[in-house]
Image (tube, rainbow, N blue to C red):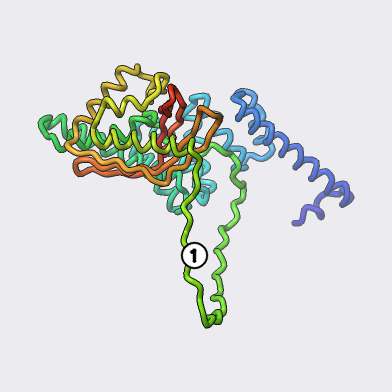
Amino acid sequence: MNILNRLHLPSALLIGTLLLSAGVHADEMQDATQLFKQGQQVAALSKVNNFLVNKPRDAQGRFLKGLILTEQAKIADAIKIFSDLTQDYPELPEPYNNLAVLYASQGQYDKAKSALEMAIRTHPSYATAHENLGDIYAKMASQAYDRALQLDSSNTATQTKLAMIQDLFSDKPRNKLAAQRSPAIPSRPLPIAEAPVAKPAPAATVPAKTLPPAKAEAPVISDKARDVQEAVEGWADAWSSKNVKKYLAHYAADFETPDGESRKAWAETRKERISRPKHIEVKVSNIAVDFTDSTHATVKFRQNYRASGFKASGGKTLLMVKSGGNWLIQEERTH
């Protein structure tokens, strides 16, 4: 039955009431999202709970509540939220991804793997889920290699493989997969539109005389950017040549170690992992330099790593600072 036939209100008043109600709810959701971003989790949770009283099935509101509960370390409650969302909205990949992040934080890698596979099946181009699944495979392999070493500690091949995987995660906090942070998912997802097939352009008339193809010009970079790029390449060369002293010299005195360990302990770990393989090859490409100010730069590039039968590639970001005339690494991240 149409709502206009059931409510005895003038049409204009009814429409105005509905619009006002929608506006109030939208404001509550916006306020909750803003409070969440500001770190005011208690106030954000109160707002989103008020929102969900009137719209209990809203995917966006429930997703935000899951994020807030995660920040409050209420993992069981957050798992329940994201799990219910996967049941009610199986076409949304983000709840599967965040469910996997929570499972991984508890060491439940099989469950995390299954959730990520569902996210990818739902949305094959969801890059975050692909990256997280790769991390899960690596962590599961690490557990298997560790178990193998417990059974046969003399297996040098397994030792090398385990060291390589640990090296991959040396600049990424342990068990920290990438969570979907934005609650801006639709409550009723729209179908993904297929890209239109381009029609072939009519054949162009070939002129009697054609000009030779123009030579591609090399991109112009500033001297400062070139200095940063050369510093990154020097760091990779030192790593490849297994020159530990030169490699460590590329890190600033205030370098932020991955797990908050002491600089000395971190340096000893790096020394062991660089010295152990017989051969290391590190190549960097697609280097992009973005300056924060005259002495700070963010460098993004692709890193290809190969060592003793093990290889891996992926994106990397270095936060660099100019100190004593040299560009040094303050922080490094994989992505």
Residue shown at the point (55%, 31%) measured from the top left: 292
> Residue 167 at what x, y percent from top left?
29, 33
Q: Quadrant of residue 25?
A: top right
Judged left or right of residue 17, residue 281 is left
Q: Nearer the viewer, residue 13 or 239?
A: 239
Towards the viewer: 323 or 198? 323
Quick check: 129 above or below 2?
A: above
Q: Position of residue 115 (x, y in %)?
A: 41, 44
Q: Element at badge 1?
A: loop
Relative to 326, residue 193 above or below: below
Out of 139 and 273, give the one closest to the viewer.
Answer: 273
Residue at 39 percent of width and 29 percent of height: 173
| Label 1 Cα neighbours within 10 Å, binned few <14 / some 14-19 / many ≥20 | few
Q: Quadrant of the N terminus?
A: bottom right
Say which quarter of the image contains residue 172.
top left
Residue 7, above or below 209: above
Image-quadrant location for residue 258: top left
Which residue lies at the image location 45% right of the left edge and 44% below the top edge? 128
Q: Tag count in the figure? A: 1
- Name the amino acid type tagged 1: Ala
Left or right: 92 in relation to 329: right
Dividing the image into 4 quarters, which one contains the C terminus? top left
Q: Which residue is mark 1?
A: 214
Indicate left or right for 87 with 167 as reference.
right
The location of residue 5, given as percent across then percent down, is 81, 55
Residue at point 30%, 18% (across, down): 265
